[in-house]
């Protein structure tokens, strides 16, 4: 193999970093990096999928707000389904309509058109008492926690049960104790919200949302007010709750990184419309809509213009390879180079996870040899190949 030098972008903790890489031993180097990173991963997400039962159906649902006597659309007619037990992300910029969509699910906002079915029932036709019973099935957590400042942690958690008026004192006490343990706040039970950190406040919010044993949990920018480390721990708690209780979680956020960490599927919103929807791995690794691409680039800290300039300097054909799950374990580049006689330069690379599934992306320039043989070898190894130039 010829020696070649090129810009290399490697990843540390999910971030890109650059350097100059001499092409000779790249197969080994990449194999080593990948194997080291993926050795630590579990395969849980490869086997876990939603149970396939639809819990939420939006059938041509639309919402307009009356402003100054005029109907201003916030959600254009939207049809979608959310499955039982999945974590469903809704991502979009400010004003895209995310909060509106999520507030329709528990009828905090009534739709101005279409039908919303929850567990096969059209909730838009509910009377007041049916609505009260329904709302116990849907918990909600908020960006700014919305705790009652005059009540202790334990009393905040007990509050929805007391309000429901259908639980005994013993039931409430036992449930509060159980939830304090679940959110690791047993020793904070008698404190007031002002005495807690942001992460602790959100844990109280989560416990309170779970008090009446809901089957759906709505999260409205639940981590947006938290620092990165606290965000991680709150997302982990939500993932544990989803896995252990089988709760369906609908999570709205303006950060694709949050979606990548916990969601199974995602809807991308732009100006009141769902512009892209699908499994997080598909949407994240192969974004189609420009808004989705912006979110993905932003979350990967990629300067798109800089990247394009780097690509212009590269010789030959340019491919982007995407490895997912099992295919990431194969130290493939060396063997493909030997088989095809193609020389590679690595222009960029990234390794990370989508939920628990490892993935890697490499952008390569290829010179000489037999390109078709190389492409066939990648595809045979279950590596997705995109020709960029
Ligand atoms: N109660 C309301 N009355 C009038 N217009 C509203 C109301 N609530 C939201 N809107 C408008 O509807 C559109 C969608 O708002 P929404 O809050 O759903 O967006 P979002 O994506 O959640 O934004 P953000 O991330 O900033 O919360 C915006 O143009 C907003 O100004």
Image: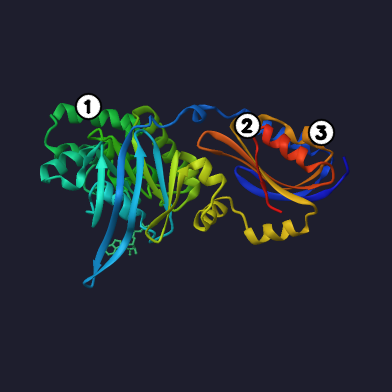
Which comes before the other along the chain, label 1 or label 2? 2
Tell whether label 1 touches label 3 (CB within 8 Å).
no
Q: Which residue is mark 2?
A: 38
Residue 183 placed where, x, y %?
A: 35, 34
Residue 373 placed where, x, y %?
A: 77, 37
Numbered label attached to residue 128? none
Direction front: furthest residue: 372
Residue at x 68% of width, y 52% of height? 388
Quadrant of the rendering where the C terminus is positioned: bottom right
Q: Determine whether the residue tagged by mark 3 lies in a helix, strand or loop.
A: helix
Tell whether label 3 touches label 2 (CB within 8 Å).
no
Which comes before the other along the chain, label 3 or label 1? 1
Residue 86 placed where, x, y %?
A: 39, 36
Direction right: furthest residue: 2
Numbered label attached to residue 339? 3
Residue 16 placed where, x, y %?
A: 65, 49
Q: Quadrant of residue 73?
A: bottom left
Q: Foreground: 217 or 270?
A: 270
Q: Which residue is mark 1?
A: 174
């Amino acid at each position: 193999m010829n020696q070649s030098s090129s810009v290399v972008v490697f990843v540390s903790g999910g971030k890109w970093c650059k350097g100059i890489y001499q092409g000779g031993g790249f197969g080994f180097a990449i194999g080593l990096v990948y194997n080291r990173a993926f050795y630590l991963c579990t395969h849980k997400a490869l086997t876990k999928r939603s149970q396939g039962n639809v819990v939420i159906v939006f059938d041509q649902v639309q919402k307009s707000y009356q402003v100054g006597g005029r109907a201003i659309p916030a959600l254009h007619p939207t049809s979608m389904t959310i499955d039982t037990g999945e974590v469903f992300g809704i991502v979009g910029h400010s004003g895209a309509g995310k909060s509106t969509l999520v507030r329709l699910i528990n009828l905090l906002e009534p739709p101005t058109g279409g039908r919303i079915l929850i567990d096969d029932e059209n909730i838009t036709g509910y009377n007041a008492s049916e609505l009260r019973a329904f709302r116990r099935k849907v918990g909600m957590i908020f960006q700014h926690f919305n705790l009652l400042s005059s009540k202790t942690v334990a009393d905040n958690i007990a509050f929805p049960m007391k309000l429901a008026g259908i639980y005994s004192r013993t039931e409430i006490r036992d449930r509060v104790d159980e939830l304090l343990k679940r959110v690791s706040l047993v020793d904070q039970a008698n404190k007031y919200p002002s005495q807690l950190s942001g992460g602790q406040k959100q844990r109280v919010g989560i416990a309170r949302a779970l008090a009446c044993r809901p089957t759906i949990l709505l999260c409205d920018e639940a981590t947006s007010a938290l620092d990165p480390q606290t965000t991680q721990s709150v997302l982990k708690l939500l993932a544990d709750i989803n896995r252990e209780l089988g709760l369906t979680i609908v999570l709205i956020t303006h950060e694709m990184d949050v979606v990548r960490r916990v969601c199974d599927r995602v809807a991308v919103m732009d100006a009141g419309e769902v512009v892209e929807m699908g499994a997080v791995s598909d949407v994240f690794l192969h974004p189609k809509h420009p808004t989705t691409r912006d979110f993905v680039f932003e979350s990967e800290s990629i300067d798109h213009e800089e990247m394009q300039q780097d690509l212009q300097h590269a010789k030959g054909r340019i491919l982007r390879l995407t490895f997912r799950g099992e295919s990431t374990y194969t130290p493939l580049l060396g063997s493909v180079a030997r088989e095809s006689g193609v020389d590679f330069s690595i222009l960029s690379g990234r390794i990370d996870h989508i939920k628990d599934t490892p993935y890697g992306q490499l952008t390569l320039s290829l010179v000489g040899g037999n390109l078709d043989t190389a492409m066939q070898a990648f595809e045979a190894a279950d590596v997705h190949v995109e020709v960029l130039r």
